[in-house]
């Protein structure tokens, strides 16, 4: 059971890091750009 909990924690950590990266890109992107719209959908 401990292996599952570790894998779950790693998955959550990876998701949080990916979300933070996405937010950083969205902050600097033009709000009407195609890139921003695609990131928002993601």
Image (spheres, rainbow, N blue to C red):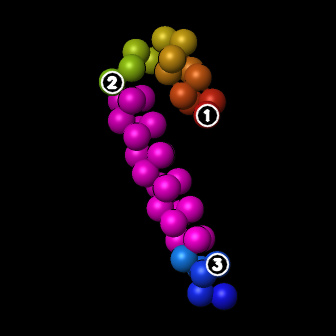
Considering every residue shown, the one lying at the far bottom of the view is 1
Q: Which residues are magenta?
A: 7-27
| Left or right of 5 on screen, residue 30 | left
| Whole-percent x, y for residue 29 in the image | 39, 20
User: Looking at the image, is 1 positioned above or below residue 6?
Assistant: below
**Sequence-earlier tag: 1 or 2:** 2
10 drawn magenta: yes
Q: CA distance from mark 2 to mark 3?
A: 37 Å
User: Looking at the image, is 22 positioned above or below residue 39?
Assistant: below
Q: Tell me the quadrant of the picture where the C terminus can be found.
A: top right
User: Which disc, if any, is residue 42?
Assistant: 1
| Whole-percent x, y for residue 11 in the image | 56, 62
Considering every residue shown, the one lying at the far top of the view is 33
Q: Disc 2 vs disc 3: Cβ atoms closer than 8 Å?
A: no
User: Looking at the image, is 15 positioned above or below residue 10?
Assistant: above
- Judging by the rendered image, the residue that carries numbered circle 2 is 28
Which quadrant of the figure has residue 21? top left
**Sequence-earlier tag: 1 or 3:** 3
Q: Secondary structure at mark 1?
A: loop
| Whole-percent x, y for residue 22 in the image | 45, 37
């Amino acid at each position: 059971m401990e292996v599952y909990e570790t894998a779950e924690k790693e998955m959550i950590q990876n998701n949080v890091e990916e979300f933070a990266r996405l937010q950083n890109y969205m902050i600097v992107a033009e709000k009407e750009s195609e890139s921003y719209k695609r990131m928002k959908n993601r």
